[in-house]
């Protein structure tokens, strides 16, 4: 009797250890589920705080950091899952074992979680989250749409090219476009200031170019837009339309 009780206790102890291994794998899966949206939000934040000339590179850099972080967690999760499943298989294959059914259920649950985690992390683990291309495409589209409000575009002068001029009677407004953050707005204001100087220099000539000949007054304006998608709990992003502010100041 004592021997049987001891054997039964050993079996239950072994089952308890296997359950702990399965629970550890599940816990690691839960950690990854939390990590992915947090890392994706950091990618979006990096791009939305970047200057116009470094938006993609800053996004790629943050995505690379996120890739390494997620891959490290994935390695630990896959190892824990594999060890738990390997330990459960002998019981699952033994129809006489009292935990046969429970072992099969646990294996199915762990395999389902593994597949779900692999699907959720595929893009970020490859270092190519689609939100980067999305922000870049939407930014380009926003700039293109805004250009339709210009009276003249890509005006070539001795100093350089003025991307956008809006005419209102005899007032010419140099309009620059910036992403809605301090770095981009400051750069846009600098560009607009230089472009205004070019026009003011041209209209002082005896025969100014026809593109600015009607400008008696010259002023500047910076319009800014934002494309910063929200990240859902699974790490996917929600599509958003660019939001605009006119006459932005940093």
Image: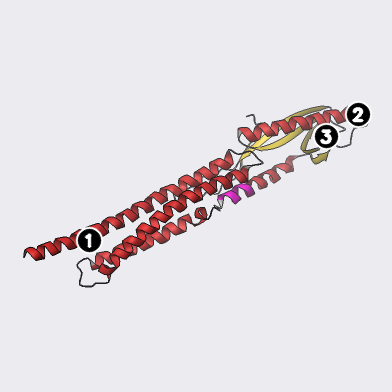
Choose top left, top right, bottom left or bottom right for residue 228: top right
* Disc with the residue nearer the chain's start (3 vs 1): 1
Q: Look at the image and give the residue range highlighted in magenta.
A: 131-136
Choose top left, top right, bottom left or bottom right for residue 247: top right
Residue drawn at (29%, 57%), measured in percent from left and top? 21
State which quarter of the image contains the N terminus: bottom left
Q: Are marks 3 and 1 in contact (CB under 8 Å)?
A: no
Residue drawn at (18%, 60%), measured in percent from left and top? 12
Q: Position of residue 68 (x, y in %)?
A: 49, 50
Tag 2 secondary structure: loop
Q: Which mark is residue 205?
A: 2
Q: Which mark is residue 159?
A: 3
Direction from residue 54 to residue 43 in the image, left or right: left
Q: 187 or 225: nearer the eye?
A: 187
Residues packed near mark 3 inside 10 Å, few (<14), some (14 to 19) or many (20 plus): few
State which quarter of the image contains the C terminus: top right
Q: 219 or 17: nearer the eye?
A: 17
Direction from residue 22 to residue 50 in the image, left or right: right
Q: 63 or 212: nearer the eye?
A: 63
Figure check: 4 above or below 59? below
Farthest residue, direction right? 206
Q: Which mark is residue 157?
A: none
Which residue matches tag 1?
15
Direction from residue 117 to residue 149 in the image, left or right: right
């Amino acid at each position: 009797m004592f021997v049987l009780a001891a054997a039964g206790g050993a079996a239950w102890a072994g089952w308890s250890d296997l359950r702990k291994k399965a629970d550890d794998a599940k816990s690691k899966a839960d950690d990854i589920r939390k990590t992915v949206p947090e890392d994706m939000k950091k990618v979006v934040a990096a791009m939305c705080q970047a200057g116009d000339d470094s938006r993609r590179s800053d996004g790629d850099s943050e995505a690379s950091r996120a890739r390494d972080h997620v891959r490290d967690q994935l390695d630990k999760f896959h190892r824990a899952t594999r060890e738990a499943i390997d330990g459960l298989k002998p019981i699952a294959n033994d129809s006489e074992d009292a935990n046969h059914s429970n072992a099969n259920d646990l294996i199915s649950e762990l395999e389902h979680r593994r597949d779900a985690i692999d699907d959720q992390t595929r893009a970020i683990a490859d270092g190519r989250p689609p939100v980067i291309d999305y922000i870049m495409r939407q930014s380009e589209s926003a700039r293109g749409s805004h250009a339709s409000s210009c009276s003249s575009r890509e005006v070539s002068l001795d100093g350089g090219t003025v991307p956008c001029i809006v005419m209102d009677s005899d007032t010419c407004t140099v309009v620059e476009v910036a992403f809605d953050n301090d770095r981009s707005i400051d750069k846009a204001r600098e560009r607009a200031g230089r472009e205004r100087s070019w026009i003011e220099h041209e209209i002082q000539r005896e025969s100014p170019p026809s593109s600015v000949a009607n400008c008696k007054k010259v002023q500047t304006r910076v319009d800014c837009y934002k494309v910063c998608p929200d990240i859902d709990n699974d790490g996917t992003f929600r599509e958003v339309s660019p939001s605009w502010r006119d006459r932005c100041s940093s």
